[in-house]
Amino acid sequence: MNAPVLDVRGVVKAFGDNVVLRGVDLAVGEHEVVALIGGSGSGKSTLLRCASLLETVDDGQVLLDGEDITDTRIDADRVRRRMGVVFQAYNLFPHLSVLDNVTLAPTVVHGRTTTEARAEAHELLARIGLAEKAAEFPDRLSGGQQQRVAIVRALAVHPRVLLLDEITSALDPELVGEVLAVVREVASQGMTIVMATHEMGFARQVADTVAFLDGGVVLESGPPQQVLGDPVEPRTRQFLARVIDAGRL
Amino acid sequence: MTTGVALPAPSELELSRRAWRRSRSRRSTLVALLSTLLFAVVAYLVVTSAPGWPRVRTTFFSPSVAWRSLPTILSGLWLNLQVLLVGGVLVLVLGLLVAMVRTLRGPAFAPLRIVATAYVDLFRGIPLIIVLYLVGFGFPALGLQGVPTSPFILGTAAIVLTYSAYVAEVFRAGIESVHPSQRAAARSLGLTHRQSMRIVVLPQALRTVTPALLNDFVALQKDVGLISVLGAIDAVRSAQILVGQSFNFTPYVVAGLLFVLLAVPSARLADAVSARARRRQQSGNLL
Ligand SMILES: Nc1ncnc2c1ncn2[C@@H]1O[C@H](COP(=O)(O)OP(=O)(O)OP(=O)(O)O)[C@@H](O)[C@H]1O
Ligand SMILES: [Mg+2]
């Protein structure tokens, strides 16, 4: 296998006395889709925030294309340009139109011309069926439409890896599908993706690897059929049993 | 947005609801009007029947004195206006700067943050008139080379020092009201701290705090009259001089009315802006 795009090595992160990550290892290869699962509070968001340099790690390393991005000498702003991140909610900037949301980083951060950035933004918006919403402001869009725009905005900078943190969990059930469809399409085009999710069905269909985070480590990881269908670890079994009880599988 | 589809004709029920709302609003307007009128008449009768009213009328409300004093007071008011405009701009700049320093994160900025916090605590605590005395009389007394002695400059400086502390807190509240995810989203797009402040956080913060800022502007409009204590010949000081010459207090009333006239447009603007902000945030029109 080629060198991983994103390589998390022994990452430790604590908030005060609360040690959330106790040495997480996770390698994400080119074009790979990794679904990060785990109970509430298991540290999925924390791991993604460490990987996107929104939090400093307390130990270990994160490598992006082989470069140690947790090195203190690194320019974090430059590193973040190479990743796309979408959060659970409040992604879009409410005072900017959909189009301006999408073209902001390409023009301001990547120095592309406005014409160029707009042309690509229109193309991307058309692909997710929101071409006619380009001039609207985010509060005129449904939650699902907003999340789709947020994905497009992250893609507009041509990131090496897309980090998605439970991007459907704040949505009404009937809006989840349209957002996941966009993720599915992005994945099919070869984007490298790490997504924290509670949507086990989706993880099973789209992910190449499912990683179960528990007790501050990746307890078990592998192909979805194995991890979700026939897990080795008792803790994974317990977790999946609870998820099934909640009707999410 | 118009849909291009005509609304169907309103039903009987809707028509009766509309009629009821109309009559309701007519009645409240009428009640408000009548009670205001009644109060004005009573107040007028009480004041004018007071034993001292004839004296008060000639010493406070003399039309001829008012007319004669108007040009002098107006030219004094020009000075207040200059302080207001120059001071207003400086307050916005300094207030924003202090607010941004106070919201900086990270231990490296701790000394700056402490200075900014101390400044805000100090100048929100001291009465403006004391700052005016300290700056207006203390600075020139140092006898340093190059320290301005004009009451216009010193008075403006004192007002800017005090008001920036208030306005900094208004800005800070606005900056902190922007959801943390907005900052995270901006930074994860690769924007620098400055860029995310300028492009993402501040525009949203400004929108939130505009009504509060306008409110402070109205307060500033009357407080610029305090530079008179430093001897600047502004509207208040001109009135004072005229009162001293004629032993008639009408010039004070004239100056006071001019300040009110100055404040009314900003006050209405503040109302309009906060009404607009409310409309934007509210989903229903019933509450
Ligand atoms: N900024 C913070 N300060 C203090 N504690 C934090 C902070 N962020 C997260 N935590 C703690 O870290 C732990 C892991 O949180 P995290 O958000 O990573 O969990 P998660 O797996 O994403 O959960 P969920 O599925 O509910 O989103 C929790 O106990 C949480 O309270
Ligand atoms: Mg989370």
Image (cartoon, grey):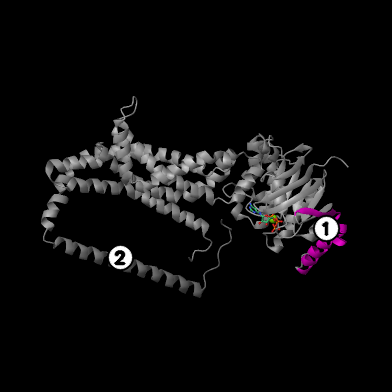
Q: How many marks?
A: 2
Which range of residues does the magenta coloring cover? Answer: A216-245
Depth check: give the residue in front, A203 or A135.
A203
- Using residue A44 as the reference point, say whether residue B183 is left or right of it: left
Image mark 2: chain: B
Q: Which mark is residue A204?
A: 1
Callout 2 amino acid: Leu
Instruction: Decide: few, some or many residues near mark 1? Use Cα within 10 Å; few <14, some 14-19, many ≥20.
Output: many
Q: Would you say residue B2 sits in the magenta stretch?
A: no
Which residue is at a point 50% across and 43% down the rendered structure image? B102
Callout 1 amino acid: Arg
Disc 1 CB within 8 Å of nearest ligand 1 atom = no
Depth check: give the residue in front, A139 or A82.
A82
- Give the x, y percent position of residue B121: 42, 46
Same chain, labels 1 and 2: no
Magenta part, dominant SS: helix
Q: Which mark is residue B114?
A: none
- Give the x, y percent position of residue A101: 63, 45
Residue to which mark 2 is pinned: B33
Depth check: give the residue in front, B51 or B63.
B51
Q: Residue furthest front?
A: A17
Image mark 1: chain: A
Which residue is at a point 39% across and 44% down the rendered structure image? B123
Depth check: give the residue in front, B236 or B157.
B157
Q: Residue furthest top?
A: B145
Q: Would you say residue A227 sits in the magenta stretch?
A: yes
Which residue is at a point 42% across and 53% down the rendered structure image? B272
User: What secondary structure is marked by label 1?
Assistant: helix
Quadrant in which ligand 2 is drawn? bottom right
Disc 2 CB within 8 Å of nearest ligand 1 atom = no
- Give the x, y percent position of residue A98: 63, 48
